[in-house]
Image (cartoon, rainbow, N blue to C red):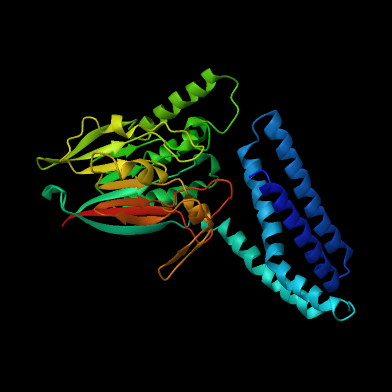
Amino acid sequence: MKYRLPLILLAWIFADIYFFDAVETLTTNDWILTGYRLIDVLLAVGFVSLFWLRRAKNPPAQFMSWLMALALLTIIPKIFAFPLLLLEDVYRVFTHFPPRSIWVSELAMLIAAIPFFSLIYGMTGGRHRYKVHRVSLKFKDLPKAFDGFTITQLSDIHAGSFTSKSGVEKGIALVNKQNSDLILFTGDLVNNQATEMDAWIPSFAKLKAPFGKYSVLGNHDYGDYMKWESETAQAANLIRLKQVHKEIGFKLLLNEALSIKKDGESIALIGVENWGKGGFHKYGDLALATAGVPDSQFKILMSHDPSHWEAKTLDHEKHIDLALAGHTHGMQFGIELFGFQWSPVKYVYPQWAGLYKKGEKYLYVNRGFGFLGFKGRLGIWPEITVITLNCA
């Protein structure tokens, strides 16, 4: 882990040297060459500032987002063009080092343009390109009254990253358009602070569902990723965040369960606090949450981190029919075409987006409503999940 940043910086430096050489091959315009160097200087200053801010205090979220956007726009295209320019240099070594070819440099620019403009789209249209994913599931133990019952799942709102009210309102309107019986939110309402939601409370309070709206906390909701002036301040932030859930009409489940009733029958809705593998805090207590739930009752679990499913849920003494999670965001980058799914996050989380099944138990991982860090989405679009429960 400690070697990752130096390796990334090394890759950037080498790719930058090669790319600048290609730019010089195509132009001698001082304005272009100076502008190129200036962007590199701004990026270097930005990273030094971030390092200083992280040591001195909490860096502003918007500063971090824009710095990451600039870094991606300047680094990723160069890395894509790097192999072609390197291959040309291998050829040049064996041909007495002639000047760099203009057509190779032009091709390198064309290759770099593809990820560059893709990232631009991801940071503009992609961040609010909401996609509705529909899943229909059959269960042997589902009460007949709930045959055809619909659930809309949302996850990872990350209100501190939002800047477009119209973009957010577009997503909220699409949620309400689904007319689901129940709305469930699986954590990470904010990036760090409850105040991030202040401007968005009226918008999210518009969400409607006849059987109610329920939620759990995610790893970011506890404020563990910023420096607080005191433990009391952090505790007060969490208290305020819990109040925000009430103000937008969500019943927050904290290692507890309740029954959703319909036509004289019921299903159990269970909500645990965040539990994640590795270094993530393990506030969730599934045993406590299910203590009063009858073994025979159909159960839906809300647990923010999908790693909780294999680690605790699958082998739990009480049969959990359906678990709902989020957390991964699908890394906000990947490919989903014609049934093919890929994102770098799959190498960290075996269950990272969509539906998973083991035996008679299901897990659905929502790709997230918002975004964090990278100020957009590319290939893995923000998700609204609609799940229909059916009797087998």
Q: Is residue 9 left or right of residue 304?
A: right
Residue 193: give x, y in percent of width and height. 52, 31
Q: Is residue 300 left or right of residue 198?
A: left
Residue 188 appears in the rendering: yes
Q: How many marks?
A: 0
Which quadrant of the view contains residue 100?
Answer: bottom right
Q: Quadrant of the N terminus?
A: top right
In the displayed structure, would residue 116 be above or below residue 388? below
Residue 210 appears in the rendering: no
Tell me which residue sits at (26%, 58%) in the image.
136
In the displayed structure, would residue 12 be above or below residue 196? below
In the displayed structure, would residue 57 be above or below residue 337? above
Residue 194: give x, y in percent of width and height. 49, 31
Which quadrant of the view contains residue 382?
Answer: bottom left
Tell me which residue sits at (24%, 30%) in the image.
291
Q: Quadrant of the C terminus?
A: bottom left
Q: Is residue 29 left or right of residue 323?
A: right
Farthest residue to the left: give it.
264
Residue 122: give x, y in percent of width and height. 56, 58
Residue 287: give x, y in percent of width and height. 29, 32
| Residue sitting nearer the eye, 294 or 338 | 294
In the displayed structure, would residue 194 be above or below residue 112? above
Tell me which residue sits at (78%, 54%) in the image.
39
